[in-house]
Image: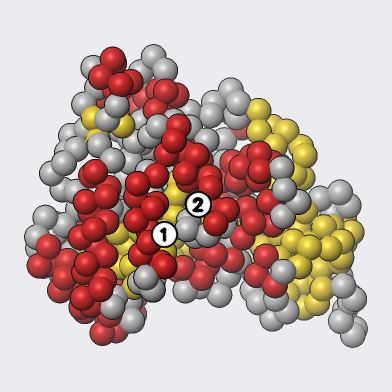
Amino acid sequence: MNLHIKNGRVIDPANGIDQVADLYIADGVIAALGSAPDGFSADQTIDAAGLVVAPGLVDLSARLREPGYEYKATLESEMQAAMQGGVTTLVCPPDTDPVLDEPGLVEMLKHRARILNQANVHPLGALTMGLKGQALTEMAELTEAGCIGFSQAEVPVLDTTVLLRAMQYAKTFGYTVWLRPQDAHIGRGGVAHSGPLASRLGLSGVPVMSETIALHTIFELVRATGARVHLCRMSSAAGLALVAEAKKGGLPVSCDVGAHHLHMIDADIGFFDPNARFNPPLRGQRDRDAIRNALLDGTVDAICSDHTPVDEDEKLLPFAEATPGATGLELLLSLSLKWAEEQRSKDALALALAKVTADPARIAGLPAGTLSVGAAADVVVFDPDARWKVERKALASQGKHTPFLGYELAGQVRATVVRGRVAFQR
């Protein structure tokens, strides 16, 4: 269909565009910006006066829970959540059941996503068989099946030699290794940030050194192999300082942070709120401030939702027994805008959008996150000033747990366009 989005404020960080203009979409791609192409006739028109028109969001970590965890969420429910959140491209970790370590499983997931015809789904393959940290997977076959990189999800590799071999293999074929920096032993079994609060609450701690020790190891392996590594869910000031130093030294590394860590600290656990239990844990105020500053200076490349839907039985438990994670797809835009609003800079909105569009697309090696002519027409139209209340009934995700329940946030998606088709309209 031919789609005309008129009178909107078009913000395309990839091309440095921020202007009021009309956007024209034909045959699933961006046909023109500004003036209509010759012979263009719109089948549908969206009046975006007073609204922002931007590339569809690219989320670097969204657990869709299929295969194996359909009791927590289904592709149908989470795709609808993505559409309501303006997220058009999803990168999925491999910690499903069974683990995404076989090409057939990857092809099945991609096929299921294609049938739903909503967000673009890009799985990460398991780095090791069964995520057990012993035998490497057939990375070439998994790539052919549709994997865009390789990850251990939340499971650290115990044997550093295995990680070395994985990086050597990845470097040879140009694959990216996605790692969450956490030491396999220090902080194992911990449920909260090591500090005075965890001590007062009697909760076992995860010290910052769990992240920094792992980073030192990863960076030494990157120096030895030249492999490209993406660091998932950075959480500490000390860790970010090491990443900045590594980048300055020319290492091929990038990193992201979870949207929740942009705003919350360990004190937000309150009276043992299981909705505030995350992996990595919410850390101190100094760490949160460092994350915000690292977004400004470019140390942090992307913001992700870290979307992890959890069912009632696994969340409504004592804090230490509750399953970590929260729903995030529908909050990614609003939480990113909240960070931009707090910067009090005219460029902050464009920078925040870059961190959830062009920059994550670059990290994942995907042709997304842009409104360039000829690019796939994945677009979000949103009202940056409209406020909405985070309530269970407002969330399309099957996972209803988030520490932001009851909060009022700015930024409401009015329409989501995927490959030129209006997939959601409020």
Secondary structure at numbered mark 1: helix
- Image height check: is 320 above or below 293? above
What's the amino acid at mark 1? Answer: Ala
Can you give x and y, in whole percent of width and height, for residue 410 in the image?
70, 37
Is 195 in front, or is 82? 195
Please tell me which residue is depicted at 32% across the width and 45% down the height of the picture: 69
Can you give x and y, in whole percent of width and height, for residue 177 in the image?
30, 68
> Can you tell which mark lies on residue 244?
1
Is 384 in front, or is 252? 252
Please tell me which residue is depicted at 35% across the width and 18% down the height of the picture: 272
Disc 1 packing (10 Å; few <14; some 14–19; many ≥20):
some
Query: Quadrant location of residue 216?
Result: bottom left
Q: Is residue 365 left or right of 314 when viewed as pictured?
A: right
Image quadrant occupied by the C terminus = top right
Q: Is residue 122 visible?
A: yes
> Can you tell which mark lies on residue 394?
none
Contact? badges 2 and 1 (CB < 8 Å): yes
Residue under label 2: 294
Query: Quadrant location of residue 271?
Result: top left
Q: Is residue 117 visible?
A: no
